Each structure stands twice: as structure tokens, then as C-alpha cells.
Amino acid sequence: MSDLADWIGGIPLITRYWFFLTVGFTIVGKIGLVNPYYLVLLSDPFFKQFQIWRPISAMLFYPVNPMTGFHYLVNLYFLYQYSSRLETGLFEGRPADYLFLLLFNWICIAIASLTVGLRVLMVAGVMSVIYIWAQVNKDVTVSFLFGTQFKAFYLPWVILLFNLIVSGAFIEELIGNLVGHLYFFLMYKYPLDLGGRSFLSTPQILYRWLPNRRGGVSGFGVPPASWRRPADDQQQGGGRHNWGRGFRLGDQ
């Protein structure tokens, strides 16, 4: 039990809540404590019956059955791995900023899903995090199936192509990649590399709930030099970015 407690305690804060809420909602729907119908995103109940919890439950619930169980476990693993790496790397010591990333991605994914009729949002949410991690670590070499190696930059699109070949579906992965790109572009690429205005900033209320901290687990990923702004050190929510070191997928 102590090993399990140590493992749980070692998961970064935001990732820990996301991971176990996803497991919990899935179990609740699977064993029938709540009818899965009320956990998925449906436009008519959401808009006409004001069932406003649906975008939240649809991000955390996954309909597990013999056909989807492996896919769920793979995405749960991706959630744990890449959310942990992003939270302890790019967002080390900045839990409010990481929570804002997830909230922004969730809202965008929910809007896109209502447009295309996507009922379950978990995969898109995980893919949006993978996309951002891959951008931060784009030159890191990662391994995929059968020992195939390539730059992390291509990882989100390799996953999309793999699911397209295996299942013929790709809309969840595509939405996740596009939303991840939108966040990355608005938060980093446009204001820092292209000199544009900053359209995204973490609300101060999140900093009051989750203040910045120093120290902790060393992170993953090294940013381009152009991303570093002296002004960030004076901002209440910014702090000094602890970008950490590069990481090769599969290293311990």
C-alpha cells in the first residue's frame, strides 16, 4: 500500500485530479451508478434542458466495453504520461497556468464537439496536451510501435494516422490537435515568436487558489530562446519558467 500511496503522491497535482476523476467517472458509468446517457455530450439536453454538467462529464467519462477497453487504457496512459511531463516541465511551479491551459482546451473542445456531434471528449482532451508537449519537445526523439523512432513534433499526427488506419476514426484526435495548436499559437507562438499581442492570460482568481511555487520535480523540455521574456519574472502569475531538460520517451 505504501508503494501505491507513494505513486499517487508523486503524480503532479492537476494531473492527479484529472487522472482519478477520469477513472472515477468511467467506473460510475460502467457499473451503472449513473446512466451513461447522462454523462455524454448531447446538444439538445445541453441547450434545451440546461443539463450544463454534460461538457464536464463528457471530458471525464469514457464508455468502456470489450471493443473500446484497450483504447481507453492507452489514452489513460497517455493522460498520465504527457500531462505529468507537461505539468512538471513547461508548467513546473505554475499549477494555475496549467489549470488554465486545461480549462481553455476543454472549452474549445466542447464547442467543437457540439458542432460536429462528438459525445465523448476524453481523447480530444488528452490529444491537446500531447500536441502541446510535442511542440515544446519537438526535437526530442520518441519511440512508437515496433520501435519506430521519430521527432516528438510528429507524435500527435502519428497517433491520428494510426487510429485512422486501425479504426477508421480520427475526428477526436484531429480536434485535440487543432485545439492544442490554438493554445500553443495564442500563448507562445504569436506573442513571443511573431511579436503579436497576447490574447491569453491566466485569471487572477486561479493564482489565488493555486499560487506559484518554486522547487519540486524537474521538468521536461527546453524552449526556444525567443520564448524567454524578462518581463515574465515581474508578472504575478508568470514567475520564472523552469523549462528543465530534454526527455527521451521510454527513459526512466
Image (cartoon, grey):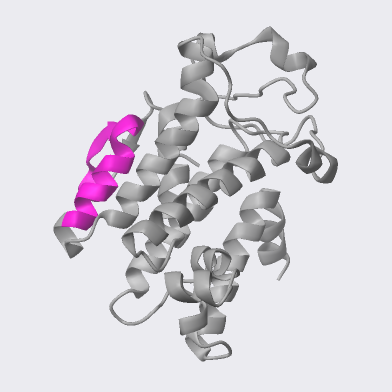
Residue 152 found in image quarter: top left
Closer to the camera, 3 or 94?
Answer: 94
Say above or below: 125 vs 193: below
| Pick the front one: 176 or 201 | 201
Q: Position of residue 250 (x, y in %)?
A: 41, 43
Q: Position of residue 11 (x, y in %)?
A: 65, 52
Q: Is residue 250 visible?
A: no
Q: Residue at x 58, y 90 (%)?
A: 33
Horizontal side of 165 relative to 188 (left or right) equals left
Q: Residue at x 33, y 30 (%)?
A: 153
Q: Specify the segment rendered in magenta.
A: 145-164
Quick one: 187 or 142, which is closer to the camera?
A: 187
| Percent coordinates x, y for residue 75 in the rendering | 41, 59
Relative to residue 104, is residue 21 depicted above or below? below
Q: Position of residue 126 (x, y in %)?
A: 45, 52
User: In the rendered view, does 85 fall on the left or right side of 3?
Assistant: left
User: Residue 149 colored magenta?
Assistant: yes
Foreground: 1 or 180?
A: 180
With respect to residue 245, does 9 lie above or below?
A: below
Q: Is the residue 232 above or below the residue 123 in the image?
A: above
Quarter of the image where one finds residue 202? top right
